Amino acid sequence: MVGLHPQTLRHYESLGLVSPERSQGNIRLYSSADVERLRQINRLTDELGINLAGVQVILDLRERLERLQLEMESSQAELNAEISRLRKRLIEGL
């Protein structure tokens, strides 16, 4: 699917770059997220010439940014709800 040699996949797993699930027979089961992550790794190494240590840093930073984005969106929703609640109280108090 991603055009990588099985040994390369095992190496990436040993480095913690990807963590596929395992079947009862201990066969690696790659999710669609794993496949996308492998494609990202391939792009970073092949197209941009980044080494695997750099790839790990980039992927970790990307995940942290995505988590922070979700936290910001959640906080924004909470703030908007609080603003609406306060506006309603203000209008009711007038």
Image: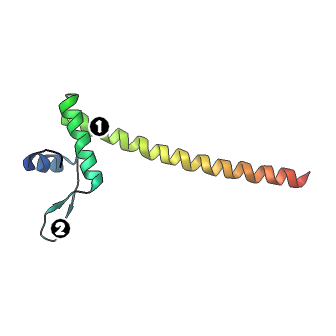
Mark 2 belongs to which amino acid? Ser
- Please tell me the numbered disc located at residue 23: 2
Q: Is residue 83 above or below residue 55?
A: below
Q: Residue at x 16, y 71 (%)?
A: 24
- Mark 1 closeness class: few <14, some 14–19, many ≥20 residues within 10 Å: few
> Can residue 88 be seen in the rendering of this structure?
yes
Question: What residue is pinned by disc 1?
Answer: 57
In terms of secondary structure, where does tag 1 sit? helix
Q: Are marks 1 and 2 in contact (CB under 8 Å)?
A: no
Q: Position of residue 69 (x, y in %)?
A: 48, 43
Observer-side mark, 1 or 2, equals: 2
Mark 1 vs 2, N-terminal side: 2
Mark 1 belongs to which amino acid? Val
Q: Residue at x 19, y 33 (%)?
A: 45
Q: Residue at x 60, y 46 (%)?
A: 76
Q: Residue at x 31, y 40 (%)?
A: 59
Q: Position of residue 89 (x, y in %)?
A: 82, 54
Q: Position of residue 94 (x, y in %)?
A: 92, 51
Would you say 59 lies left or right of 42 here? Answer: right
Residue found farthest to the right: 94
Residue found farthest to the bottom: 24
Name the image quarter holding residue 64: top left
> Can residue 50 be seen in the rendering of this structure?
no
Separation (CA) of disc 1 from disc 2: 29 Å
Residue found farthest to the top: 48
